[in-house]
Amino acid sequence: MNIYFLDPQWMKRERFDYFVKILKVKKVFCFIPKDVFNVKDILPPTIKVLQINSENLQSFLKDCVYSFIKEISVPIKHDGIFEGEYCVRDVYGDSMPLNPIYNIEKLDDPNILILRTLHSRGTIGRDFRTYSMNILNKYGTIDYMNRICFYFLDKYLYCSYILDKFCDNDHVEYKLRFAIVSGTTEDGWYSNNNSNWPFINEKQVLYDPLLSYLHFKSNNVYNEDNIQKRFLTAEGIVSFENNLIYDYDSAQRDFLFYDDNANSMNDWGQNSEMDYINNNGGDWIYD
């Protein structure tokens, strides 16, 4: 299963549906108001959409978490009465946390696309992951962090980031790293923070597999020679070129600053809140 994160500011509206189709997205959580980006208008009705309305950010975030985990965590009821326990299902067993293309090509999991802007994103990626995993870990023994691929796409479709697991003795951390394949590393994943990382030199052949996959899968539909021209607006391409000329590497470090605080396990009381919802006619979260 893949959970993608994207700021759609520069995406071509008329091609967004095909972009989502390539990624095999079945559900969209949009943290951008409809008057800015009405995602329902540009997606087929087969894709379920949750979009922030008048509720505050944290309230909407909870709705998205519940919508996600309902596929995995099911309330146990006796004679129709919820008694505070959940059954965490054993699903997505073939999914790979570091191989989004395999998950797309070989599986039919309900991939999710989470849309947010620079101003709205804050720690949405971290909080969504933390809240949902807290619930699943409380009631089950399956580590879904080892099954779900959390993938962050740059708004210019120039680079992307994958959440990876780092172990130091008994201490486990999750960090974003550039999702670039290289022949120079043992595991095939290359991560670098110097300003030359996106380019090919004589010693390294680097490419972003998911962005290359998007380009390859759209070859028979669009004839532009790069992924930016295929999926970004003209204004987006100008903005991309300006950022690339001036200080794009700095901008990417800013991106990581927002979404790479991956190890906070703050709890907003979601377990007790779910119990309250299920005890008070809140089955709507499983609709």
Image (cartoon, rainbow, N blue to C red):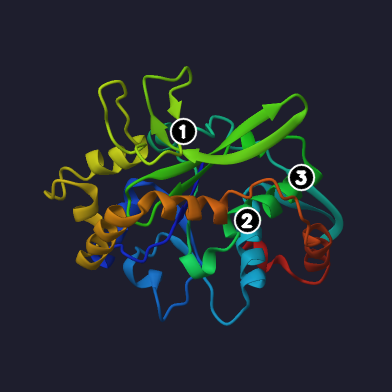
Q: Nearer the viewer, residue 99 or 86?
A: 99
> Could you tell me if the residues under marks 1 and 2 are in contact, i.e. CB atoms within 8 Å?
no
Residue sitting at 77 percent across and 35 percent down?
A: 141
> Which secondary structure lies at badge 3?
strand
Marks 3 and 1, the one that precedes in the sequence? 3
Identify residue for label 3: 87
Q: Position of residue 245 (x, y in %)?
A: 27, 54
Q: Where 119 falls versus 47 (above or below)? A: below
Residue sitting at 78 percent across and 62 percent down?
A: 268
Residue type at the position of mark 2: Phe
Q: Position of residue 202 (x, y in %)?
A: 25, 22
Q: Position of residue 179 (x, y in %)?
A: 43, 37
Is residue 143 visible to us here?
Answer: no
> CA gap, disc 3 to disc 1?
38 Å
Identify residue for label 2: 128
Left or right: residue 192 versus residue 65 is left
Residue sitting at 39 percent across and 19 percent down?
A: 184
> CA gap, disc 3 to disc 2?
20 Å
Q: Quadrant of residue 145?
A: top right
Determine the residue located farthest toward the top in the rendered image.
186
Q: Specify the label residue 191 is tagged with.
A: 1
Question: Are there few (<14), some (14-19), or many (20+) residues within 10 Å of tag 1?
Answer: some
Q: Position of residue 134 (x, y in %)?
A: 75, 49
Mark 1 or 2: in front is: 1
Marks 1 and 2, the one that precedes in the sequence? 2
Mark 3 or 2: in front is: 2
Q: Where 76 falls versus 54 (above or below)? A: above
> Could you tell me if the residues under marks 3 and 2 are in contact, i.e. CB atoms within 8 Å?
no
